[in-house]
Amino acid sequence: MPWLDHFGLLAPLYDLVIRSRETTRLADLAGLPIQGRLLDVGGGTGRIARFLVGQAGQVVVADESWKMLSHTPAKAPLRLAAAHAERLPFPGGGFECVIMVDAFHHVQDQQQSLAELLRVCAVGGRVVIEEPDIMHFGVRLVALGERLALMRSRFRRAEEIAESFRSLGAAVSIYRQDTTAWIVAMPAGASSG
């Protein structure tokens, strides 16, 4: 979201304003722990990824804003990569798990982003998108607020995201709890587990 932090004002305050949340459900849906690599796309300051260290052989945070990445705690053993979700600079199948937490509604080309998440995920691995569930009134208010703030946010129903994954050949499941939805996709050739 570099357009949102053009002047570098948000990055230093991000972790104070946006609180880290409990990651147990995310870790469970992602099939953690794993021996392989985990990629957190749109991971910003690593606020989620740092809680997943030790549950994967390596944890990589990719975000299009170097300003956000530069505020990742130095003591967190995370690898950082400045990258757009639509053009990830990683080889195909390089990650056993790919996550995107509360960031999908910010990407410009959502279909291309889904294709990239699947491309970098290994067969047998999982892609997990965690998003605010737009079916809830409170989330609709947040979406309206972001629109009024001229953010480029585009919230979609979990079923729409799942259908987009299916059109790319992935097997998909949807989970919901309170105001959060998780869309879990497995690349073509993967079996559920």
Image (cartoon, rainbow, N blue to C red):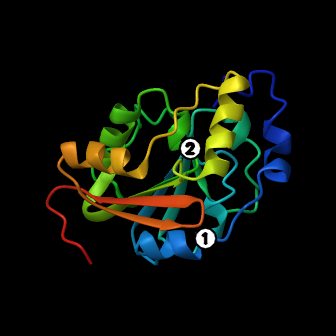
Check disc 1 and report the residue beneath it.
Answer: 23
Residue at (46, 78) in percent of width and height: 33
Query: Which quarter of the picture shows residue 54?
Result: bottom right
Gap in angstroms between the C-alphas marked 2 and 1: 15 Å
Residue at (85, 52) in percent of width and height: 16
Instruction: Give x and y (percent) for residue 94.
Output: 33, 54
Check disc 2 and report the residue beneath it.
Answer: 103
Residue 41 sits above or below residue 29 on the image = above
Towards the viewer: 174 or 88: 174
Residue 49 visible in rendering: yes
Instruction: Give x and y (percent) for residue 84.
Output: 49, 32
Instruction: Give x and y (percent) for residue 63.
Output: 58, 39
What's the amino acid at mark 1?
A: Thr
Q: In the orientation shown, which residue stands out farthest toward the left? A: 189
Towards the viewer: 105 or 31: 105
Q: Is residue 142 left or right of residue 95?
A: right
- Location of the N terminus (image quadrant): top right
Towards the viewer: 122 or 114: 114
Q: In the orientation shown, which residue stands out farthest toward the front? A: 137
Residue at (28, 53) in percent of width and height: 93
Residue 168 visible in rendering: no
- Location of the C terminus (image quadrant): bottom left
